[in-house]
């Protein structure tokens, strides 16, 4: 089963069990957040650095490298 | 049999071994871990996404996991996964956690009290700042490993792996297996340090015989993929506009300073950096455990006695927080800590002590061979971001470091962002030349304000500031 979620208005497919970060990388994206105008993506990959955070279903500050993607999740990029 | 209740924090090799040791001595065990699955970083996996070739010592993991599952069946063990431990009261040996989907609102509040706590919180990668390290496509060596193992993905087509220590080798192997190309593996330490660390005491290899086999396997993997392995080399600048487009590498001297005239460009679209590990000691510090003394920016470890007891009564520690020694050491330390926590008599634990002692030397040799040298500071330029969260550059930190006031240094906000200094704190302290206490955290895990407000009616002294 490959759940699909929405990222920034586009559909992204996640291989079953992939994290949001894993699915975004698999879809060819390297970055999905901006910090002081510069792009950021995943850095530590294990929930330490907070670089990969996204908003999921309206809740901000979700570490994409820890959160398993679920069918129908609405994921939006964050800016700081 | 023991009637004690042992709480274990962390489900990596040390935590799993601690749970197993405590159960073997008859104690009741509650294991808390923030991951979706047991195994920690070392055995990070996913049933359908992990290539089995990426795992080492997997049979040991399965044995520990199955024994724990059996103990859960019989009611002697409880495992709480996806548990973010945010506060520990050491005196009452009480642990506060939020349990549920990572960073989701509405997680369940849990509070557990026990007779002893085993801290097995592990370590995370240390990546040193350098020009271009915030570009998308630059990840830690641990991230490369985690993404390959957990998600079956690689960040770039061609990754340059750079840093220090034997961990770079399994990372390169994982990248190759997960479908990436490895441009090169750059080891900052030079041959003399490596030789002194690894060959000066060859008898210690007997204790780490498993390691020798593992290293040989990595060497074979590098050779098979024709991946260059260069000692005394480092990446000193990462190139690109919106993502990694290449990297400049250089020969490094014994202090890790780039040698003039040796810089050259390497084609790559990803860089994996791993300059060693930082032990995750914030839980131990919150509880009040004594830690080792070290220069600003150098890792501090939890002090334990011969039985893995910390300075706080009823609190024990095992694994990377007591010294970076790898999985074999973590397993031996965890087993001993768990048994001690369960109340086993010292005299009955001679075998467990001997097993732990045999792995001790490995940690020391790692540090001798690959320990960080100060020359990394010369990689920085004024506008190189050091604090990734708050986008504070090296020049700003250098100017603040010159001021007499500690408040002035903290006013840069370096180390005070979302990651709470976990990523840059050691570098900031090294650049300021003093400890700023960035690893003393009132909250051990990120929480929503609403979750904190809910928790305020919980017993125990809660932090007055967040």
Image (tube, rainbow, N blue to C red):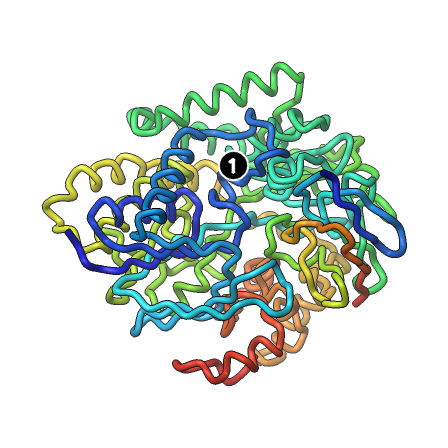
Label tally:
1
Q: Decide: is B319 above or below B220.
A: below
- The residue most toward the front is B74
Coordinates of residue A12 in the picture (x, y in percent): 82, 46
Query: Callout 1: 10 Å neighbours few (<14), some, many (20+)?
Result: many
- The residue most toward the left is B347
Instruction: Using the rendered view, name the quadrant where residue B149 is placed.
Output: top right
Q: Residue at x 81, y 65 (%)?
A: A79
**Residue tagged 1:** B165
Instruction: Using the rendered view, name the quadrant where residue A2 is placed.
Output: top right
Along the viewing direction, whichever of B82 and B232 lies nearer the viewer: B82
Along the viewing direction, whichever of B246 and B201 lies nearer the viewer: B246
Q: Is residue B25 left or right of residue B287?
A: left
Is residue B419 in view from this perspective?
Answer: yes
Along the viewing direction, whichever of B464 and B247 lies nearer the viewer: B464
Which chain does the numbered disc 1 sit on?
B
Coordinates of residue B24 in the picture (x, y in percent): 23, 44
Q: Residue at x 20, y 48 (%)?
A: B25
Q: Residue at x 61, y 70 (%)?
A: B106
Coordinates of residue B301 in the picture (x, y in percent): 39, 55
Coordinates of residue B293 in the picture (x, y in percent): 38, 60
Q: Is residue B105 left or right of residue B290?
A: right
Q: Decide: is B148 above or below B5.
A: above
Q: Is residue B381 left or right of residue B274?
A: right
Is residue B237 in view from this perspective?
Answer: no
Instruction: Using the rendered view, name the quadrant where residue B398 is placed.
Output: bottom right
Label 1's element?
loop
- The residue most toward the right is A9
The C terminus of chain B sits in image quarter = bottom right
Along the viewing direction, whichever of B270 and B372 lies nearer the viewer: B270
Q: Residue at x 49, y 68 (%)?
A: B86
């Amino acid at each position: 089963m490959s759940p699909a979620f929405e990222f920034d208005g586009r559909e992204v497919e996640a291989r079953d069990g992939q994290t949001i970060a894993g699915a975004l990388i698999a879809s060819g994206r390297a970055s999905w957040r901006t910090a002081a105008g510069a792009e950021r993506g995943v850095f530590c990959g294990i929930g330490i650095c907070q670089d990969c955070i996204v908003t999921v279903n309206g809740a901000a500050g979700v570490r994409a490298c820890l959160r398993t993607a679920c069918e129908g999740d609405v994921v939006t990029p964050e800016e700081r | 049999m023991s009637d004690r209740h042992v709480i274990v924090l962390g489900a990596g090799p040390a935590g799993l071994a601690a749970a197993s040791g405590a159960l073997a001595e008859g104690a009741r065990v509650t294991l808390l871990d923030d991951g979706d699955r047991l195994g920690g970083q070392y055995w990070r996996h996913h049933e359908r996404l992990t290539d089995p070739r990426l795992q080492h010592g997997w049979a040991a993991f399965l044995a520990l996991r199955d024994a724990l599952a059996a103990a859960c069946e019989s009611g002697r063990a409880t495992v709480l996964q996806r548990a973010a431990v945010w506060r520990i009261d050491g005196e009452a040996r009480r642990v506060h956690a939020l349990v549920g989907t990572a960073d989701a609102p509405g997680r369940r509040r849990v509070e557990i009290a026990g007779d002893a706590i085993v801290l097995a919180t592990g370590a995370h990668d240390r990546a040193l700042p350098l020009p271009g390290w915030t570009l998308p496509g630059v990840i830690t060596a641990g991230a490369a490993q985690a993404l390959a193992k957990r998600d079956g993905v690689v960040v770039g087509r061609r990754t340059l792996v750079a840093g220090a220590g034997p961990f770079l080798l399994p990372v390169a192997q994982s990248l190759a297996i997960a479908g990436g190309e490895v441009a090169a593996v750059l080891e900052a330490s030079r041959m003399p340090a490596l030789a002194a660390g690894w060959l000066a005491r060859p008898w210690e290899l007997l204790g780490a015989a498993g390691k020798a086999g593992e290293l040989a396997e990595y060497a074979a993997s590098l050779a098979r993929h024709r991946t260059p392995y260069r000692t005394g080399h480092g990446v000193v600048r990462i190139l690109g506009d919106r993502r990694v487009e290449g990297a400049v590498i250089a020969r490094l001297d014994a202090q890790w300073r780039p040698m003039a005239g040796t810089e050259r460009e390497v084609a790559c679209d990803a860089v994996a950096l791993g300059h060693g590990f930082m032990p995750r000691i914030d839980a131990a510090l919150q509880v009040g455990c004594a830690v080792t003394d070290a220069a600003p920016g150098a890792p501090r470890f939890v002090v334990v006695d011969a039985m893995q007891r910390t300075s706080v009564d009823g609190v024990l520690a095992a694994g990377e927080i007591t010294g970076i020694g790898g999985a074999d050491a973590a397993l031996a330390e965890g087993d001993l800590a768990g048994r001690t926590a369960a109340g086993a008599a010292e005299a009955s634990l001679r075998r467990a002590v001997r097993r732990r002692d045999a792995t001790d030397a490995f940690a020391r040799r790692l540090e001798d061979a690959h320990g960080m040298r100060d020359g990394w500071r010369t990689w920085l330029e004024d506008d190189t971001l050091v604090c990734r969260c708050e986008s504070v550059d090296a020049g700003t930190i250098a100017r603040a470091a010159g001021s007499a006031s500690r408040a002035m240094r903290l006013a840069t906000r370096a180390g005070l962002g979302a990651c709470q200094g976990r990523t840059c704190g050691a570098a900031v302290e090294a650049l300021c030349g003093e400890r700023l206490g960035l690893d003393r955290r009132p909250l051990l895990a990120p929480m929503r304000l609403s979750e904190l407000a809910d928790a305020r009616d919980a017993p125990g002294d809660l932090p007055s500031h967040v």
